[in-house]
Image: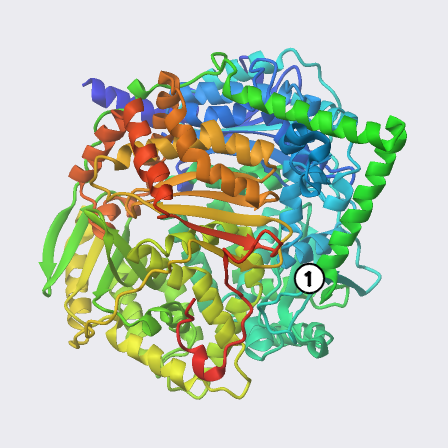
């Protein structure tokens, strides 16, 4: 009885009758309006804070993963990055929580599954998500106090923003006048400064930010340009906070099933001490292009891994209508998809397939995030000779499309994708709603309009039915010459020019400091002492009393989790795992075909194979026809490489090809047929096959240096781990630097090369992809559709080839003995990793190792590598299934120091007197991910993909809850200290090669041009 009553009460979360009427007041707020949105199963409630005018949107939904966000309009006054630096410094301590870095200190005191802060071009917001009610209250209190009442100490500004100090202040203090020149050298420091220096290594980012400078000259660079960051003063930071981080300038959003009244009480209590001020509501507009075409060229870096003759990026842009017109904005986004999505789209065929460029430029498509829309079509990988042809070709294609009109089948495909995205039950629905609404809300779009999906789609279909609607939008906005053509040309001296500018700026700042201090010696003394004061301040982080910070407790974590109910069957001689659950009429399919003794040269080409089958078409259907069918009948299908370590022996691994698909129940047979056609019928013998493969390779290698930069620590980790276990070695061959070397070397073959050797291997992969007796499947669907799905699956499995997929036993990978490896890449900062082998998933030592990784990250490495070392990020990790423990650093200006910290971390952990609360916090942070909500299609997948049973998971859960301080010290000694003494580690760093990379390092050059006859082979290191 009580259970039903509770369920009824929970259902009422979305019932409008539960809430005040428009005009009524509740806890310091007035309810302005409310709206039920049945297609999203939510109710939106718009309120305003009576005293300050703060804008508040509550989205009630029967979802336990509740979300909070507070955001502020933050139009940047210049390029100093003041909004970005403020986003960092607000999180460094507040009135109610006057400790160093409460944001990072909260990470191990919360069960949240998401905590972050974001600086957008003209607003800044601070979101979190959690399923725990006490946790929600705790975090909301910390976030509100951090943003509204930060301490903004000067040391926070110098740590997070910028400062000048000796490279190694501790060594200088110890050695005095005898300090080495490299230790005492004065340099620019600061977390944001180094982060943005890292961004300035990324040609894609530079292109996008310079384009924004010209299309939106009134919106300065909110992230900060390193050349201008060093102009920002502490006083300017405080002033910007006072003017912008105020309730009158705030927009708050809450989402989920927790009571609105509780949120309002807390928020009103925190805001009621403020008086109303004039908010920063200016929505900056783009340039007007009514007076005809404009052309701008900027300089950018050369990509050493891409074709030297195809280094230009260029785009042509139009300014479109007001984005507050939700219907028109939706229609322009759909128009953009029809014109450029997929290999069959007119712009892809006319611009990339034709060879004008290798891939889209970073600004391509419709951007509706600002007050007016921007429609851009651009290319990267363009030769100098072709730059001038791009705009004319775009305009020709537009005219051609306008004359032919749009295919209703393609439009239906996009609307079908929208329908499926609404039906798919994700675990992070609240966060996706937040991210979809917040930008447009800040630029004047009514969030109620943005939520009303069905109304927008119905209005679109109504306009479409009247005829000529999309063509009319092309006439209105695109079929004219009111354009901005923006081009980025490669400069061989770009990086050297940046370094020279920084050196000159540094000297000027040192001269100014010298003048102010009354002499060079006094200035140096001041800078060195300030650095030591900051170190002392940072040193307090490990000893200060954190009792003012709220927390959840390990006792709040349930000792057992309800197992996921699955059943096993055998269909056509193959194992099938069934998961029956409410799926909104969708079926999710996965299959894995496992291979024995797969040859290295075939494995390395599986990523190219999975790209090629989504590109080449079959003998009976073009890729355009296949893409249309996929959009119209499925929520997407994919084929990819799969490898996993064994949970009982991490040195053993299995590998194969994985197939996934999602469709409405009624379309499952078509989904299976599409997968079968793509895998078995792709035509590698077609006359265009070699050209299409070249284009895929060029698109993959274009901008790869930027791709590595955006996640350099992940590449470093993979490279380090590859020397330790088979599954890590497999993974590195597929998605690591080895794969990058292979793809760039293949892309660099002469234009006359027809890739016969590569195509032959791709056809070998095609033969074995669905063959053999080692295929297993998993289906997640509603109970009422399992019978029909079983029948469709039987037909699919029966249609497979009967060939064997086994190979003769070959040589196993011989792991590299190079303990230290360096990859020279043109970055201004470094990315590093150190990895060690440990134990299998089922070992009792796995749990304390996982706790140790959290302890080291939160209690030691964040402080040493980020706060003191100036890197953007750093920490420890334990890959439980892979049996690997490691360390990493990200955008790191101080790699030698970091490597020393990593090597000594084990000894630090053994010697540390851990407190009960240290252990408590580490366990809480581990369970954030363990107990994070999961989407229905991922339930039961650990068992299916890697063989981790519910029993194994439950044992691991109990072991993690029961880890003791002695357990932690024991594993730190055995798997870190002792292992390093035995030289079991692998270390990898990426970045510019300096003198410290001596003969003890194995240097792996990345931009090697391989001879054609070698290029198809897997690159050996």
Q: Quadrant of residue 561?
A: top left
Q: Which residue is pictured at 39% across the width and 47% down the height?
A: 835
Report the side of 967 relative to 535 (left or right). Answer: left
Q: Which residue is pictured at 23% across the width and 72% down the height?
A: 810
x, y percent for residue 156: 66, 26
x, y percent for residue 714: 46, 50
710 is higher (above) or lower (below) than 257:
below
46 is higher (above) or lower (below) than 586:
above
Q: Check the image and name the residue furthest to the front.
A: 178
x, y percent for residue 240: 74, 28
Q: In the rendered view of the protein, which quadrant contains the N terminus?
A: top left
Report the side of 606 relative to 4 (left or right). Answer: right
Q: Which residue is pictured at 48% across the width and 76% down the height?
A: 746
Residue where numbered disc 1 is placed: 301
* Residue 31 visible in image: no
Report the side of 593 relative to 996 (left or right). Answer: left
Q: Quadrant of residue 203?
A: bottom right
| Colour scheme | rainbow
Q: In the rendered view of the protein, which quadrant contains the C terminus?
A: bottom left
């Amino acid at each position: 009885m009580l259970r039903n009553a509770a369920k009824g009460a929970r259902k009422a979360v979305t019932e409008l009758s539960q809430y005040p009427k428009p005009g009524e007041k509740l806890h310091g707020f007035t309810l302005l309006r409310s709206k039920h949105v049945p297609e999203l199963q939510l109710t939106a409630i718009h309120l305003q804070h009576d005293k300050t005018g703060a804008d508040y949107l509550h989205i009630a939904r029967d979802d336990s993963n509740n979300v909070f966000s507070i955001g502020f309009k933050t139009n940047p006054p210049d390029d100093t990055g003041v909004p970005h630096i403020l986003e960092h410094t607000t999180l460094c301590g507040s009135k109610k929580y006057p400790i160093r870095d409460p944001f990072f200190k909260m990470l191990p005191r919360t069960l949240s599954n998401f905590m972050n802060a974001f600086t957008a071009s003209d607003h800044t917001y601070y979101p979190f998500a959690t399923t725990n009610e006490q946790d929600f209250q705790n975090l909301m209190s910390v976030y509100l106090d951090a943003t509204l009442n930060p301490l903004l100490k000067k040391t926070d500004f110098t740590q997070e923003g910028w400062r000048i100090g000796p490279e190694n202040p501790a060594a200088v203090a110890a050695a005095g006048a005898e300090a080495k020149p490299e230790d005492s050298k004065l340099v620019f420091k600061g977390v944001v400064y180094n982060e943005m220096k890292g961004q300035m290594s990324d040609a894609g980012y530079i292109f996008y930010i310079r384009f924004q400078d010209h299309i939106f000259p009134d919106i300065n660079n909110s992230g900060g340009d390193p050349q201008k960051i060093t102009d920002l003063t502490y006083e300017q930071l405080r002033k910007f906070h006072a003017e912008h981080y105020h309730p009158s300038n705030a927009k708050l959003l809450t989402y989920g099933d927790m009571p609105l009244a509780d949120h309002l009480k807390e928020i009103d209590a925190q805001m009621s001490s403020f008086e109303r001020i004039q908010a920063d509501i200016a929505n900056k507009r783009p340039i007007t292009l009514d007076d005809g075409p404009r052309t701008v060229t900027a300089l950018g870096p050369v990509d050493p891994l891409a074709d030297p003759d195809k280094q230009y990026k260029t785009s042509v842009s139009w300014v479109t209508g007001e984005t507050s017109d939700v219907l028109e904005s939706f229609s322009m986004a759909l128009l953009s998809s029809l014109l450029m999505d997929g290999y069959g789209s007119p712009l892809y065929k006319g611009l990339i397939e034709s060879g004008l460029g290798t891939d889209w430029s970073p600004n391509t498509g419709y951007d509706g995030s600002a007050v007016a829309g921007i429609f851009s079509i651009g290319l990267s990988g363009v030769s100098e000779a072709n730059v001038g042809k791009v705009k004319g070709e775009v305009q020709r294609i537009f005219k051609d499309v306008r004359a032919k009109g749009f295919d209703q089948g393609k439009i239906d495909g996009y609307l079908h994708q929208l329908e499926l995205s609404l039906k798919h039950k994700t675990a992070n629905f609240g966060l996706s709603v937040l991210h979809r609404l917040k930008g447009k809300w800040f630029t004047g779009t009514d969030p109620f309009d943005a939520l009303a999906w069905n109304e927008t789609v119905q209005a679109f279909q109504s306009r479409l039915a009247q005829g000529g609607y999309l063509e009319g939008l092309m006439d209105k906005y695109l079929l004219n010459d009111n354009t901005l053509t923006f081009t980025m040309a490669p400069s061989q001296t770009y990086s050297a020019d940046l370094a020279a500018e920084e050196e000159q700026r540094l000297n000027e700042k040192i001269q100014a400091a010298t003048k102010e201090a009354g002499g060079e010696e006094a200035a140096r003394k001041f800078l060195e002492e300030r650095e030591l004061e900051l170190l002392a301040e940072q040193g307090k982080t490990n000893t200060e009393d954190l009792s003012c910070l709220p927390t959840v407790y390990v006792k709040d974590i349930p000792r057992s989790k309800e197992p996921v109910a699955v059943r096993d069957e055998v269909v056509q001689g193959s194992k099938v795992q069934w998961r029956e659950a409410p799926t909104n009429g969708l079926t999710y399919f996965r299959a894995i075909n496992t291979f024995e003794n797969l040859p290295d040269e075939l494995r390395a080409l599986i990523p190219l194979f999975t790209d090629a089958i989504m590109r080449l078409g079959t003998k009976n259907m073009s890729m355009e026809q296949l893409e249309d069918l996929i959009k119209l009948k499925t929520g997407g299908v994919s084929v990819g490489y799969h490898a996993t370590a064994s949970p009982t022996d991490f040195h053993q691994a299995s590998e194969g090809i994985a197939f996934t698909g999602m469709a409405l129940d009624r379309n499952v047979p078509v989904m299976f047929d599409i997968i079968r056609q793509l895998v078995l019928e792709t035509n590698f013998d077609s006359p265009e096959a070699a050209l299409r493969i070249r284009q895929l390779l060029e698109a993959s290698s274009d901008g790869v240096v930027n791709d590595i930069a955006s996640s350099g620590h992940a590449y470093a980790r993979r490279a380090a781990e590859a020397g330790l276990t088979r599954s890590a070695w497999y993974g590195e061959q597929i998605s690591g630097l080895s794969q990058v070397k292979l793809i760039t070397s293949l892309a660099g073959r002469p234009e006359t090369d027809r890739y016969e050797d590569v195509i032959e291997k791709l056809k070998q992969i095609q033969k074995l992809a669905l063959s053999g007796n080692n295929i297993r499947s998993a289906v997640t669907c509603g109970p009422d559709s399992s019978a029909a799905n079983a029948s469709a699956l039987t037909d699919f499995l029966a249609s497979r080839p009967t060939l064997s997929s086994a190979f003769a036993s070959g040589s196993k990978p011989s792991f590299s003995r190079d303990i230290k490896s360096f990859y020279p890449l043109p970055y201004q900062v470094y990315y590093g990793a150190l990895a060690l082998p440990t134990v299998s998933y089922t070992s009792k030592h796995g749990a304390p190792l996982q706790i140790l990784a959290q302890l080291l990250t939160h209690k030691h490495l964040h402080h040493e590598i980020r706060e003191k070392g100036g890197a953007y990020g750093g920490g420890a990790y334990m890959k439980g299934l892979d049996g690997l423990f490691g360390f990493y650093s990200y955008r790191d200006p101080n790699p030698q120091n970091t490597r020393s910290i990593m090597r000594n971390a084990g000894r630090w952990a053994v010697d540390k007197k851990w407190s009960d609360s240290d252990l408590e916090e580490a366990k809480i942070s581990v369970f954030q991910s363990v107990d994070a909500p999961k989407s229905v299609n991922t339930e039961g997948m650990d068992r299916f993909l890697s063989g981790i049973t519910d029993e194994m998971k439950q044992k691991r859960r109990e072991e993690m809850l029961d880890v003791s301080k002695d357990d932690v010290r024991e594993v730190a000694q055995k798997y870190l200290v002792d292992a390093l003494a035995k030289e079991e580690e692998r270390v990898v760093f990426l970045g510019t090669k300096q003198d410290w990379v001596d003969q003890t390092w194995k240097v792996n050059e990345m931009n090697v041009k391989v001879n054609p006859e070698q290029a198809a082979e897997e690159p050996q290191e």
